Amino acid sequence: MKQFLPFMVMILILGIVSMTIVNLLNYNLKKRIIDAGPLDETAVKLLEKLSAAHVLKWAIVFFTGGLGLVVIELLPFSATESLIPYGLEAIFLAMGFLIYYLTLKNNRL
């Protein structure tokens, strides 16, 4: 278990760095689109849709992540003795991303 903690910290740091890079690149892309000249209505709607989808994604993921933590608290397993709570949290986060994907898929049809 003591070897598992540095691994998780490294994954967390890499995740934060990658999210920062992706957000900076998205900002630069949106800025270039806006600076390119006058936008028609479809381009404005696309930019608004991208921003709304980003907020929806993180709202769903944080909700399911919190729900997973609540469920873990109710289980009789200890995090120091078992890896089941980590797996359960990963399952809840994956369900959040799946819900987000299905929501976007249904809205685009």
Image (tube, rainbow, N blue to C red):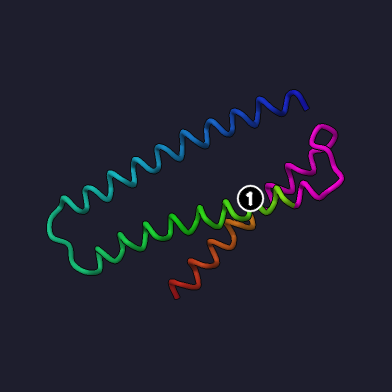
Q: Position of residue 35 (x, y in %)?
A: 16, 50
Q: Nearer the viewer, residue 71 or 84?
A: 71
| 2 lies above or below 82 | above
User: Which quadrant is home to the N terminus?
Assistant: top right
Decide if residue 89 is on the left or right side of residue 83. left
Find residue 27 and report its horizontal and vertical position in percent.
31, 45
Residue 57 vertical position relative to residue 17 in the rendered view, above or below: below
The quadrant of the image that shows the C terminus is bottom left
Q: Is residue 60 magenta?
A: no
Q: Which residues are magenta?
A: 71-93
Residue 93 position within the rendered picture, expressed as x and y whole percent measured from the top left: 63, 51
**Residue occupying the far bottom of the picture:** 109
Q: Looking at the rendering, which quadrant does residue 11 occupy?
A: top right
* Residue under pointer 1: 65
Comparing 77 with 27, the one in front is 77
How many marks do you count on the picture? Answer: 1
Kind of residue sitting beneath label 1: Gly
Q: For this rendering, which residue is in front, 99 or 65?
A: 65
Residue ranking furthest to the left: 37
Residue 88 part of the magenta-drawn span: yes
Q: Horizontal placement of 71 versus 63: left or right?
A: right
Residue at point 36%, 63% (across, down): 49
Q: Badge 1, how many Cα within 10 Å: few under 14, some, many 20+?
A: many
Q: Left or right: where does residue 95 sit relative to residue 84?
A: left
